[in-house]
Amino acid sequence: MATAALSRFRQPSVIPGFGLALGFTLAYLSLIVLIPLAALIVRSAGLGWTEFWRLATDQRTLSALKLSFGASVIAAAINTVFGMILAWILVRYRFPGRRIVDAIIDLPFALPTAVAGIALTALYAPNGWIGQWATPLGLKIAYTPIGVVIALTFVSLPFVVRTVQPVLEEIDTQYEEAAATLGAGRLQAVISTVLPSLLPALMTGFALALARSVGEYGSVIFIAGNIPGVSEIAPLLIVIRLEEFNYAGATAVAALMLAISFAMLLVINLIQAWSRRRFGHGA
Amino acid sequence: MDIRIQNIRKEFDRFPALHDVSLDIRSGELIALLGPSGSGKTTLLRLIAGLEFPSAGRIHFGDEDASEKSVQERNVGFVFQHYALFKHMTVADNIGFGLRIRPRGSRPSRRDIRRRASELLDLVQLSGLEKRFPAQLSGGQRQRVALARALAIEPKVLLLDEPFGALDAKVRKELRRWLRELHDRTGHTTVFVTHDQEEAMELADRVVVMSQGRIEQIGTADEIYDDPATPFVFSFIGASSTLPVVVTKGTVTLDGQPLSIAAADLPDGPATLYLRPHELEVVAGGDGAITGTVTAARRSAGSRLVEIAVGTARHHLELQLPAETSVVIGQTIAVSPRRWQIYGTGVGPGRSA
């Protein structure tokens, strides 16, 4: 049995070095990702189930997790819609300054997130450039969950644009033209021909933006105001617990975040695999 | 339906793709737009479809001026070079697409759409493939699905861009015959683009030869082949060789030697003599013949292809001789054309009577 299983991996191939490459990949992945994560799990397992449950169901923990994941989903959704529009404009149109717009997209990647957080706070604070117009409308942006969403939207903007852009570039306009010759209006043509092919890329972009947002710390803590139970995000709660030398509390929150993130990314990947089969992009 | 194209000009970013093209297509005709790449044939087809709009000129569909009409309003069936089948839809959904997206008022029922799709699949001889995805079809099958999809909207005109370009030679030949039959049966006014002269000549009622954004000649296969209007048409259609000659008072001379070719209606001056390999025959030599040295000879099916170098400048000339003719490299050979064509600089053709 063992040899049979082994030989399945050892089929003759034109690409040699599978064993070496796989070994290297696993070693590298372990060193960089798996060992730290395993340590986290071991640490929280040491808490015992009741203790873990007590820490995890703590009201402050729950609302922090809810804010982190809720705001991240909203930010990722916003970026999926507007990121697609941005990618569309960059790919399909030629206009002066296109290269500059293209470069601006990456700025949230390059900027230290704390700088972004401070800049956003200055803008959206009740006396800031934008905040002063929102306040009379009864809208408070900074120091509320809305501020958290804005900061997360800012830092995760590049992901959707950068995943959709190359796929969109590969999609020939002949499909839209074919739809048009068959009588489809512009929007109809795009929805029925381009969107299905873009769906996997959109989902990858959404997943990446979501993952980035969930882990974001630097930019959020300035604009959020960090009111426990209202605008306190989970990563910040972890830091607070650490500063209190409450390592058990910190690991419990971290382990929960890890579990939820993993579950969400897995679901997105499964949907993606299904849609790839269904819509067969690249097949 | 008749299509009248009047003085169409098209520029892309100031680069002219078509200069002042006019063409009348009769109802029910099968027309080929033939030319090398960059000749503007695909641009002309896209202009007829409404996928591009002309910089100047008008396009009439029957009595209607269609110049300003959008592609959706023109109701043309267009088959793209690479078929542009929607990959995420089944064959039946692809064919029914044009009907399914109609506004509610004019949309046939689901069942009618399904029935229409399978009727069309019968027509293109792909019955039973409704549930397949385009990726599961061969090139020839995809081509036919694309055609069925274009026919589903009952178009007034059928336009095909390099319809057989991406297929292998055998499938191409079959589809060519099949398309001709389909055209004769359905009677659509059909325009197709090709760079394959054999395809154009075999399939089309009339061939439009294009080069560098201009129409060089419009005519039946016989007219194009036997009576090429321009040097371009002569050299583009079929094999040909050229020799630089000089016309003096109706006499044609090559390297100072008079040839037995009459050119009474040509003005004096330098000209180019166009010859076809299979219209040259070996003669005993002497006055009036074209004499050269054999540089290469090879057997090709029923004939022998011989290359000779003519005169002091060693002009290249190709001959297609009967297979039983034996030639030796280096041997001197004299040939005389049965038919020929002379084009002076900037004047009309003179030709063998």
Image (cartoon, grey):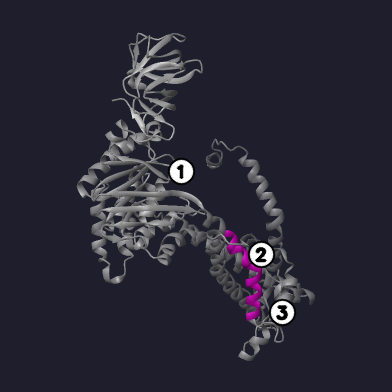
Asked if residue B211 can be seen in this view, the reply is: yes
Q: Position of residue A26 (x, y in %)?
A: 66, 50
Marks 3/1: CA distance? 57 Å
Up the image or down, A39 lies above or below B328; here it is: below
Q: Which mark is residue A121?
A: 3
Q: Nearer the viewer, residue A276 or A146?
A: A146
- What kind of residue is marked 3? Thr
Marks 3/2: CA distance? 20 Å
The chain under label 3 reads A
Q: Which quadrant of the view contains residue B318?
A: top left
Dot in front, 3 or 1: 1
Neighbor class of circle 2 (other Cα within 10 Å; few <14, some 14-19, many 20+) is few
Q: Position of residue B53 (x, y in %)?
A: 41, 58
Q: Nearer the viewer, residue A193 or B238?
A: B238
Q: Position of residue A252 (x, y in %)?
A: 68, 72
Q: Secondary structure at mark 1?
A: loop
Q: Which mark is residue A104?
A: 2
The residue where tag 1 is placed is B38
Question: In the image, which residues are magenta?
Answer: A146-163
The chain under label 2 reads A
- What kind of residue is marked 1? Gly
